[in-house]
Image (cartoon, rainbow, N blue to C red):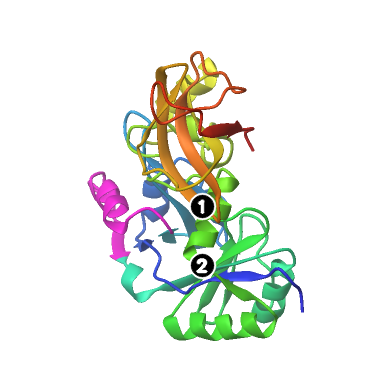
């Protein structure tokens, strides 16, 4: 047994949409922020942007075959992604099937978790790839820091692998514990931390979720312009503090001036962590932030990463 292994409570993902049809690849390639050219078996994380390059949703896109894809997201709603796609299906031979309600999922994490999955599924998912075993699909996730995997399947299959993970010494991670770990690591949830008024670069996603070489897609011109400029005026920051987490969108002040707002926050005992969208203009990283213009400094900024 390996200590430190954790799994989340089985749940239905916010999004599981199957995309098929002879134009499925070319259509999705022109809509998704990342490159979907890797062959079947690939798992690619990226974003669904609007014309202004703002973030509407995120997902992993699993390429099942040449023109069959699964779109899955833990935080972005299926109706948002489906509507985003339907708005741009014109003469394309593409079909969308929402399977969110009939699919179950869990996240398995911890050092050595890939080795355990390899034993149970026959192979451990490599970065950027997924593994299929019976009614299960597994791929390297981004919902938690460190080694972690998202597992999708039928309720029966997910319940079965949960029992097998328990037999290997894994214990359940509560939703609050998972949220604390995610926020402390600076992993944004879309659209809670990065949404329709935000650019990918403001959440630090330009390096992993955006392709600058794939060619045209919705929002691509804005992404290219940002790459050339090399700078945004706001950025998502990690904060730490003590006490009760503030509500989402609570204003933050430094030196008597509003510098941004909380996007998400979580606590563990008296320790509190948060993700906040802050203006980079005149922000002093060494100075604390408060919830009132003349109030005390309640939060300290943590370095990026």
Q: Quadrant of the N terminus?
A: bottom right
Left or right, residue 3 beside residue 164: right
Q: Which mark is residue 174?
A: 2
Left or right, residue 33 beside residue 204: left
Q: Residue at x 52, y 41 (%)?
A: 209
**In the rendered image, is residue 245 in sight?**
yes
Q: How many marks?
A: 2
Q: Residue at x 36, y 44 (%)?
A: 247
Reply yes or no: does residue 82 show up in magenta.
Answer: yes
Q: Residue at x 47, y 71 (%)?
A: 105
Give residue 22's position: percent from left, percent from top: 36, 58
Would you place residue 103 above or below residue 284 in this image?
below
Would you place residue 23 above or below residue 257 in this image?
below
Q: Quadrant of the C terminus?
A: top right
Q: Nearer the viewer, residue 26 or 60?
A: 60
Give the class, few, some or many, for how many residues have Cα within 10 Å of label 2's Cα (few <14, many ≥20).
few
**In the rendered image, is residue 215 in sight?**
no
Q: Which mark is residue 267?
A: 1
Q: Secondary structure at mark 1?
A: strand
Toward the right, the furthest residue is: 1
Q: Nearer the viewer, residue 244 or 151?
A: 244
Find the magenta span and give its range. Answer: 74-97
Reply yes or no: does residue 29 show up in magenta.
Answer: no
Q: Quadrant of residue 147?
A: bottom right
């Amino acid at each position: 047994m390996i200590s430190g292994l954790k799994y989340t409570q089985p749940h239905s993902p916010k999004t599981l949409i199957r995309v098929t049809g002879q134009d499925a690849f070319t259509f999705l390639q022109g809509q998704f922020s990342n490159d979907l050219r890797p062959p079947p078996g690939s798992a690619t994380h990226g974003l669904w942007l609007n014309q202004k390059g703002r973030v509407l949703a995120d997902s992993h896109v699993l390429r099942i075959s040449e023109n069959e894809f699964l779109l899955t997201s833990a935080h972005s709603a299926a109706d948002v992604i489906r509507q985003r796609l339907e708005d741009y299906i014109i003469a394309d031979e593409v079909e969308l099937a929402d399977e969110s309600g009939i699919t179950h999922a869990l996240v398995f994490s911890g050092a050595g978790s890939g080795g355990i999955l390899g034993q149970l599924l026959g192979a451990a998912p490599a970065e950027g790839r997924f593994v299929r075993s019976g009614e299960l699909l597994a791929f390297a996730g981004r919902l938690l820091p460190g080694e972690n995997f998202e597992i999708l399947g039928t309720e029966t299959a997910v319940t079965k692998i949960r029992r097998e993970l328990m037999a290997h010494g894994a214990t359940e991670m509560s939703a609050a514990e998972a949220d604390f770990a995610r926020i402390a690591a600076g992993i944004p949830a879309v659209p809670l931390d990065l949404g329709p008024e935000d650019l990918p670069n403001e959440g630090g996603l330009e390096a992993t979720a955006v392709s600058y070489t794939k060619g045209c897609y919705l929002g691509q011109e804005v992404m290219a312009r940002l790459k050339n400029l090399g700078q945004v005026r706001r950025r998502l920051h990690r904060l730490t503090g003590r006490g009760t987490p503030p509500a989402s969108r609570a204003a933050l002040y430094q030196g008597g001036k509003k510098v941004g707002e909380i996007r998400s926050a979580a606590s563990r005992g008296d320790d509190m962590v948060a993700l906040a969208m802050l203006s980079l203009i005149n922000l002093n990283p060494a100075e604390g932030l408060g919830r009132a213009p003349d109030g005390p400094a309640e939060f300290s900024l943590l370095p990026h990463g």
